[in-house]
Image (cartoon, grey):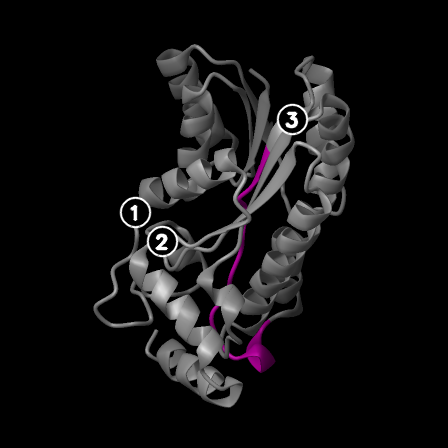
Amino acid sequence: MGTALVTGASAGLGVEFARLCAADGHAVVLVARRAERLQALADELQRTHGTRCLVVPQDLAAADAAERVLAAITASGLAPPTILINNAGLGAHGPFADTKAETALRQILVNIALPTELTRRCLPAMRTAGHGRILVIASTAAFTPGPLMAVYYATKAHVLSWSEALHEELRGTGITVTCVCPGPVRTEFQQVAGLDGETPVRGLKLMPPEVVARAGYRAMRRGRAIVIPGLWNQVLALCSRLLPRFLLRRIVHRLQRRR
């Protein structure tokens, strides 16, 4: 088996994706800022699956983050990744006019710049190998404008469009790009983004990260372009495409104000 690179691997979906990769026999590269959490996960995966793990503590908003991560893989002697899981993501809730410049910029760097550069740097080795799987985490937010989370929603719209384009460009090469568009997931993202831990739609539950990760991982292995885990999330994504844009943004604004 090959090498799987997982960003944002210290919590939530990243942990679950790393477990799935290790269970399939891949060597796993774990990347995030919190070294202690990464090492604890690496110890778990090595103990449970006997897989080799490389821990790479890295601020993923740094301009040279992708370069540093791939240099660490080369220095470790691991093969270049043939599975790339672009999971790391940031969000922030509140009026855009009140958003600090650093907060907005970090979302763009982590949600857009990092997966773009990691993918660009990983593709040559995948093309040489003749196979590869790339997974990118977007969101159902990708289908709508997002008042009160304007930058986050916009970054996810970018990720979805970019992933679909790459999927088509790479058709027939043995390399696929899968974009996962979950609704709200029960992870630390809710607290970090300044949310209350609830979904914007009353009665809609936060999805467990292991359920979302399994759906995304299966779709990635099958080479699907897009997967939306959960029936209600699929319905909401469909509605977002049918409603007039002026009405859609007003509905989202009202829902976000409840948070």
Q: Judge left or right: residue 44 versus residue 208.
A: right
Seen from the viewer's position, the closer of residues 67 and 164 is 164
Which residue: 32% across, 43% down? 211
Which residue: 63% across, 44% down? 60
Q: Which residues are magenta?
A: 84-99
Q: Main secondary structure of the magenta part?
A: loop
Instruction: Say whether marks 3 and 2 touch (CB < 8 Å).
Output: no
Q: Residue furthest top?
A: 50
Q: CA distance from mark 3 to mark 2?
A: 27 Å
Q: Amino acid at mark 1?
A: Pro
Return the x and y of residue 251 as percentages of the image width and height.
40, 84
Question: Which residue matches tag 3?
Answer: 81
Q: Residue furthest front?
A: 172
Which residue: 66% across, 15% down? 78
Question: Which residue matches tag 2?
Answer: 185
Return the x and y of residue 10 as percentages of the image width and height.
46, 36
Q: Quadrant of the C terminus?
A: bottom left
Q: Amino acid at mark 3?
A: Pro
Instruction: Say whether marks 1 and 2 touch (CB < 8 Å).
Output: yes
Q: CA distance from mark 3 to mark 1?
A: 27 Å
Q: Earlier in the sequence, mark 3 or mark 2?
A: 3
Q: Quadrant of the N terminus?
A: top right
Q: Judge left or right: residue 174 versus residue 49.
A: right
Q: Is residue 61 visible?
A: no
Q: Earlier in the sequence, mark 1 or mark 2?
A: 2
Question: Which residue matches tag 1?
Answer: 208
